[in-house]
Amino acid sequence: MSKQRVLTGITTTGTPHLGNYVGAIRPAIAASQDQNNQSFYFLADYHALIKCQDPEQVHQSTLEIAATWLALGLNTDNVVFYRQSDIHEIPELTWLLTCMTAKGLMNRAHAYKAAVDANRADGEDSDFGITMGLYSYPILMAADILMFNANKVPVGKDQVQHIEMARDIAQRFNHHYGEHFALPEAVVDDHVAVLQGLDGRKMSKSYGNTIPLFLTEKQLKKHINKIKTNLLEPGEPKDPDTSTVFQVWQAFATPEQTAEMRRAFEEGIAWGEAKKQLFELINGQIGDARERYNELLANPAQIELELEKGAEKARVYSAPFIDKLRHAVGIRKIG
């Protein structure tokens, strides 16, 4: 039986934080060990250009995110780990798909509609500041997925619409040019943790409330101490279910450790003590990976070597497939 293909993209904007780790990186690396899967992981640097036009930031983020995945134990012998921009067939496929995509479909994309609504609320022209990158990036995402005929695409709920769009585009292409694309399915894991940030909102770079994953021990302790808490004194019972400290603890702890901390909250553990134990828990789990991460950052040539190796593996699939698709649409040699 052929393995099912699972594909995950990581946008190269910003520095990875604890929320990225528990929500995406940790489960993806665990899934890559499943021998029933053929896993594709890519650094989505073309996607990064939609949000960020700072070349140094895009470059640095690519370095940091690649180093993060490698430091946390991604086995590149088991998976295809590549940089999106190294697969030149992807932008070519994006154009082939663009020519088959209804504008009305793109008009319904959540990100575009949200940008239009924000402009109108501000009294601006509907399309003020909206680039074609933002407008049509669901097509680029479709190309990422369809290039490798991925069967399963793990995403958050906010990305399900884009997988549905990829299916629509694939079906339209298949109807017009013959059966070339598998229809991808979104995989939403409701059990994956969504961490709260320092201020109690979802941990997100856009809120500026993150705890970067590989801070030094001193900086990690400082960030954890900034987590917002209430004014309850030591000895006063505290509600774990409304506490960011407890929620982050739960994402890193075993069930037994979680039960112990829940009891400690009910018995009135001091916030300072709870944060101290949280620091020790997280630091104990990421300490070795932090060391590997810093070694990789000091040796970027090693990271580049891994990405080039991954690009070669990816192009084994993409190069012959784009030739087949070119032929299907009528772009062929004459005679």
Image (cartoon, rainbow, N blue to C red):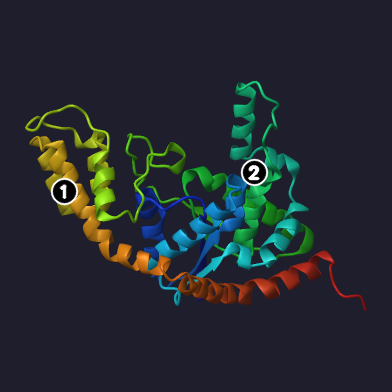
Circles 2, 1 touching at the beta carbon (< 8 Å):
no
Question: Where is residue 300 shown, x and y percent of the image?
Answer: 47, 69
Observer-nearest of 199 and 58:
58
Q: Say which residue appears at 18% left-offset and 33% top-offset.
A: 239
Farthest-out residue, right: 335
Disc 2/disc 1 C-alpha distance (Å):
42 Å
> At label 1, which amino acid type do we have?
Gln
Residue depicted at 87% across the width and 75% down the height: 333
The tag earlier along the polypeptide, 2 or 1, is 2
Crowd band around label 1 with a 10 angstrom C-alpha radius: few (<14), some (14–19), many (20+):
some
Mark number, residue 134: 2
Q: To which residue does mark 1 refer?
A: 277
Q: What number of labels is visible?
A: 2
- Please give left or right for residue 17 compared with residue 120 in the image: left
Q: In which quadrant of the rendered image does the C terminus lie?
A: bottom right
Is residue 95 visible in the rendered structure shown here?
Answer: yes
Between residues 298 and 85, which one lies in front from this camera angle? 298
Left or right side of 114 for 201: left
Q: Tell me what residue is drawn at x 64 percent, y 24 percent.
A: 120
Identify the image quadrant of residue 331: bottom right
Q: Secondary structure at mark 2?
A: helix
In the image shown, does 49 or 28 lie closer to the viewer?
49
Q: Position of residue 318 (x, y in %)?
A: 65, 71
Residue 190, x across and y down, in percent: 38, 47
Tell me where residue 45 appears, x and y as whole percent: 58, 57
Q: Residue at x 62, y 77 (%)?
A: 316
Looking at the image, can residue 191 be seen?
no
Residue type pointed to by label 2: Leu
| In this rendering, position of residue 128 left or right of residue 118 | right
Which disc number belongs to residue 324?
A: none
